Image (tube, rainbow, N blue to C red):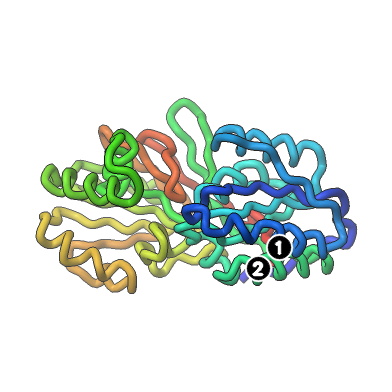
Amino acid sequence: MLPVTADAHLSGPIAVLVNPTAGRGRYRGLLPQLLDGLAAAGRPVRLLPASSPDEAESACHAAVADGVAALVAIGGDGTVHRAMQAVAGTDVPFGPVPAGTGNDFALDTGFPADSLAAVAMIADALRAGRTHPVDLARMTGTDGTERWYGAVLAAGFDAICNERANRMRWPRGPRRYDLAILVELARLRPRRYTLRLDGVPHELDAVLVAVGNCPTYGGGMRICPDADPTDGLLDVVVAGRVNRRTLIRVKPRIYQGTHISHPLVSSYRARTVELTAEGITTYADGERSLDLPVTISAVPGALRLLR
């Protein structure tokens, strides 16, 4: 565990990114209380204007460039992911407030599931000038594009299902993803991957590859159950030549993390992961990200959490 750090001179406003549609809007009524809780830290609270994910990310970058004391993201993993791009690798402290359908990064890094309790923790850390450093994963594409993520990168069947669901216009809501899974299950086939783990190559056929900085994704699925965001390493979980029946049978075990004992599931650990396959668009923290091939590096202490 990395040591707790303290800043005695945090100053300036608290910038807050809010996703009002997170958790299907069920947290919207709590927003005034959440903002009041942050104001209890004794600093002005500044809401960041954003009407799209790209605008949200740009607003966070602008706030950090303006010298805010801290950045807080109220929403799910997607909102946290967007805000994280602005503070990764900087000295600006960050507070994720769980208020979405999936809150994997916040929960895996020690924040309470209750959003009001998370705000109280963040405000107390701000008053005390207290931060906890945690690792992030940095992705680099072939064109040099860089993205950060905190939880898990999906680069197999799960990413393919997300990509199909995002192309569909019907049905709305979770049923669209369920339908995408059914379609892709019918088309399931292993793909050839090349993994280079700290420079050591592995050629394999697989239906699922996940690279985790934290254990969970998808709202509590422990896909990389042994991942630790303070150990300076990435956990890689691979489901090999798995057929439809086996995948359906193994999937419920992911919530407990017991799938890694299946003979067709392998796990690895590395500081740097180079991942190559044809026709895969990755999803990081549930957000559409870079096309393969990518290089992923664990960056120790890249984020300073307010807890």
Q: Are marks 2 and 1 in contact (CB under 8 Å)?
A: yes
Residue 301 in view (yes/no):
yes
For the residue pair 70 and 196, the one nearer the viewer reads as 70
Residue under pointer 2 = 116
Disc 1 marks which amino acid? Answer: Gln
Describe residue 199's horizontal placement relative to residue 75 as left or right: left
- Position of 285 relative to 126 (above/below): above
Residue placed most toward the observer, 201 or 190: 190
Q: Quadrant of the C terminus?
A: bottom right
* Amino acid type shown at disc 2: Leu
- Location of residue 207 in the rendering, given as x and y in whole percent from the top left corner: 21, 50
Res 254 quadrant in image: bottom left
**Image-based side of 204 in relation to 91, left or right:** left
Residue found at the very far front of the displayed protein: 29
Q: Which residue is mark 1?
A: 33
Disc 2 to disc 1, how far (Cα)?
8 Å
Number of residues whose C-alpha sits closer than 10 Å to that of mark 1, classed few (under 14), some (14–19) or many (20 or more) = few
- Binning the other alpha carbons within 10 Å of mark 2 as few (below 14), some (14 to 19) or many (20 upward) gives many
**Residue drawn at point x = 55 percent, y = 69 percent:** 113
In the rendered structure, which disc, 2 or 1, sits on the residue that comes first in sequence?
A: 1
Residue 47's tag is none
Q: Secondary structure at mark 2?
A: helix
Q: Position of residue 218 (x, y in %)?
A: 39, 57
